[in-house]
Image (spheres, helix red, strand yellow):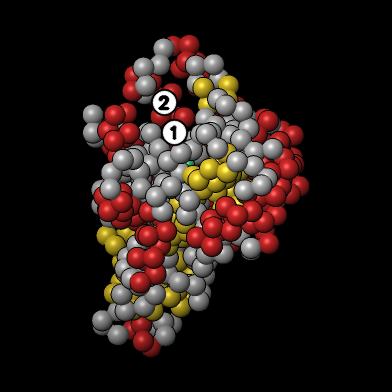
Amino acid sequence: MDRCLLLAAESFDGARFHHSPRTLLLDNDRIEAILPGDSTTDATHLPEKYRRAETAVRRVPFVMPGLVEGHCHLFLDGDETAFDVRAAHLKKPFEELLATGRQSLELNLAAGITACRDAGDVHGVNNALREELSADPGASPTLLAAGVALRKAKRYGSFLAREAQGLDDLPGLLETLLPQADQLKIMLTGIIDFETGTMKGGVQFTLEEATLIQQTAARAGKLTFCHCSGVEGLQVAVGAGFNCIEHGFFMTRDILAAMRDQQIVWVPTFMPVDFQWRYPEYCGWNQATVDELRKILDNHDEHLRLAYELGVPVVAGSDAGSYGSPQGRALIEDLVLMRRTGAAAAQVLESATSLPRRLWGLPAADLAPGIEANLLCLAESPERQITAVRRPVAVYHRGWRHELSEPTTREALLVRN
Ligand SMILES: [Zn+2]
């Protein structure tokens, strides 16, 4: 990239919006300085090296840190809505799943995402991708991989997780899983029965088992995150002190208060449920189920607002790869849905940038001198209109600049059908 003056009419630095122009001085892959105002026309106060003719000058309406996708499954194609094709995908040879994973990383980058946390796959595709990236990161998003997740024998999650019987075999299994996991993923509950608005299958691990898992992971220096919805499961998650709760449907104020006290992170993943409410015909839902879906989503909206109010750490994640959640675009739509709950734009963007980076030990991407130029440029400010996140203009990452022009719209979700 060499040297570049990036003039942004407005910006978000990872915590706050700036409404007046600022000029970012980019030297290779670093932000060297940020000057107030437009320094592209008056070069007198610029360091000498930026006054040379070869310095590129770019003007963008809006700049912010590159996005973090907090929950995705890279080996799955979330664009695919045919149930039989999705089932057949899981039986493909490893190399084909790996190819899907590579394509998923590209789709994430194209949406402005520069870091992803993969929430597990039983084949170890995420581990293979991480290995490829460590040999040659290229332009790809940074990847945190859960490796293979953990579930209770015969319970939900066969495509993501290895089976444990209970207290006796958990230590040995954790010894195998933990070294491969940047963070350990646990399947703590099943999925939602949308027709009745209840949980299927009950809680997978007892409080004693969950506590053993948490303590073993903590001793190995690994964070934990658990697939969990429904009050019974949420109580076990909080009781065991898992570091992060994924989905968390049927959330309550008491659980949120406990999460705030223990600083347990919530990744609310609106998209897979929102898709089924918005497009019920794909799953054959009748009006009663649509009403049930709406009730579940209304409860989620209300508790997301409350989570921010109480000070629960919230991280954005879309469960991309799941049914109705296309890689890359699903996170963008999740941000739109989070904002529509009434949460402030700055809160929502912080949940998708600086906060997950800080919590998960990723390099900072804030707009600040000395930080890597890990930037997303947009065609307008998402503070005024959150849907601006659907219109990325360019991404700066690892010393590369990627021009992006394809708008990522909700309608584009349905390209296959
Ligand atoms: Zn998931």
Q: Position of residue 161 (x, y in %)?
A: 49, 44
* Quadrant in which the C terminus is drawn: top left
Q: Which mark is residue 109?
A: none
Q: Is residue 299 above or below residue 111?
A: above
Q: Is residue 174 above or below residue 210?
A: below
Q: Nearer the viewer, residue 335 or 152?
A: 152
Q: Residue at x 52, y 34 (%)?
A: 154
Q: Nearer the viewer, residue 258 or 125?
A: 125
Q: How many discs mark residues in the rendered view?
A: 2
Is residue 411 visible to us here?
no
Residue sitting at x 69%, y 37%: 206
Residue at screen point 67% across, 51% down = 214
Residue lying at 28% horizontally and 44% vertically, measured from the top left: 92
Left/right placement of residue 125 relative to residue 153 reads: left
Return the mark for residue 276.
Answer: 2
SS category of the residue bearing label 1: helix
Residue 273 percent across, percent down from the top left: 47, 29
Identify residue type, mark 2.
Gln
Quickly name the residue at label 1: 272
Q: CA distance from mark 1 to mark 2?
A: 7 Å
| Residues packed near mark 2 inside 10 Å, few (<14), some (14 to 19) or many (20 plus) | many
- The image quadrant of residue 387 is top left
Q: Amino acid at mark 1?
A: Pro
| Residue 271 placement (x, y as % from top left) | 45, 35
CB atoms of marks 1 and 2 within 8 Å: yes
- Residue that lies at the very extreme toward the front in this rendered image: 168
Nearest to the observer: residue 254 or residue 32: 254
